[in-house]
Image (cartoon, rainbow, N blue to C red):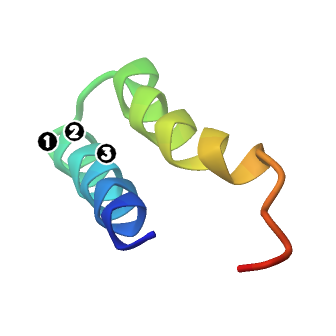
């Protein structure tokens, strides 16, 4: 679970790194969807 959180955080930081210098929004959205996609998967209720 911890590694998942670290990967999600890294994707968010990469999205910001692309957004701040003015990268095209499609490149920023790539990272945004990379963060949101795993959250749409069902969560194991035992967690």
Distance from disc 2 to disc 1, alpha carbons, whole Å, reads 6 Å
As displayed, is residue 25 above or below residue 36? above
- In the rendered structure, the answer to whether residue 7 lies left or right of residue 32 reads left
Residue 20 % position (x, y) = 20, 50
Which quadrant holds residue 6?
A: bottom left
Residue found at x 17% / y 48%: 17
Kindly state the secondary structure of the residue where label 3 is placed: helix
Nearer the camera: disc 3 or disc 1 = 3
What's the mark number on residue 15? 3
Disc 2 + disc 3, Cβ < 8 Å: yes
Q: Which residue is mark 1?
A: 21
Residue lying furthest bottom: 47
Distance from disc 2 to disc 3, alpha carbons, whole Å, reads 5 Å
Using a 10 Å C-alpha cutoff, classify the residue at mark 3 as few (fewer than 14 neighbours), some (14 to 19) or many (20 or more). Answer: many
Kindly state the secondary structure of the residue where label 2 is placed: helix
As displayed, is residue 29 above or below residue 2? above
Disc 3 + disc 1, Cβ < 8 Å: no
Disc 2 + disc 1, Cβ < 8 Å: yes
Residue 38 % position (x, y) = 62, 45
Q: Nearer the viewer, residue 30 or 44?
A: 44
Residue 35 % position (x, y) = 50, 48
What's the mark number on residue 18? 2
Which quadrant holds residue 5?
A: bottom left
Residue found at x 49% / y 36%: 34
| Number of marks present in the image shown | 3
Residue found at x 71% / y 80%: 47
As displayed, is residue 23 above or below residue 47? above
């Amino acid at each position: 679970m911890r590694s998942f959180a670290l990967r999600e955080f890294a994707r968010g930081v990469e999205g910001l790194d692309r957004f701040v210098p003015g990268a095209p929004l499609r490149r920023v959205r790539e990272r945004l969807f990379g963060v949101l996609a795993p959250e749409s998967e069902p969560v194991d209720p035992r967690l």
